[in-house]
Amino acid sequence: MAQTTTDHDAIRKWAEKKGGKPAAVESTHSGDDAGIIRIMFPDAPNSEHDSLVEITWDEFFKEFEDRKLALIHEEDSMFSKLVSRDSAD
């Protein structure tokens, strides 16, 4: 069952528990602009993260807040999706 959260600590704990790392789409990432953010799971089978670059959690959460995002995720899987907080309601 999917859950939605904007809690930074909960997101980080959930991601790190599954080997997830904060990332940005490389073609949109430059300097102080994180660009399009994702949570990547580099150790996952069939992982296709060639277009992602790892960023810091601080960079991730700055962009997360600037864009007013929420994370939809499943506790027992690596499923996750970043969505607008407006569409998460």
Image: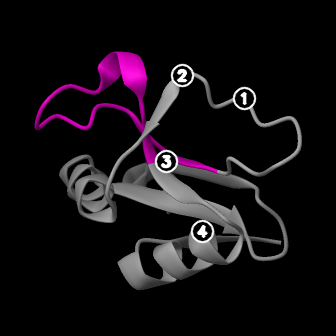
Report whether residue 41 is seen.
yes
Separation of disc 3 and disc 2 at Cα? 20 Å
Q: Residue furthest top?
A: 27
The amino acid sitting under disc 2 is: Ser
The amino acid sitting under disc 4 is: Ala
Task: Say if mark 4 contacts mark 1, CB within 8 Å.
Answer: no
Determine whether 41 is above or below 9 in the image.
above
Q: Mark 2 falls on what kind of element?
A: loop
Task: Say if mark 2 contacts mark 1, CB within 8 Å.
Answer: yes
Task: Say if mark 3 contacts mark 4, CB within 8 Å.
Answer: no
Separation of disc 3 and disc 4 at Cα? 16 Å
Say which residue appears at 60% left-offset and 68% top-offset.
15
Q: Quadrant of residue 54?
A: top left
Task: Give me the disc on residue 51.
Answer: 2
Separation of disc 2 and disc 1 at Cα? 8 Å
Q: Mark 1 falls on what kind of element?
A: loop
Separation of disc 1 and disc 3 at Cα? 21 Å
Asked if residue 3 lies in the magenta stretch, the reply is no
Say which residue appears at 63% left-offset and 31% top-offset.
49
To which residue does mark 1 refer? Answer: 48
Please tell me whether mark 1 or mark 3 is closer to you in this view: 1
Magenta span covers which residues?
23-40
Q: Residue 42: x percent and y percent?
A: 68, 47
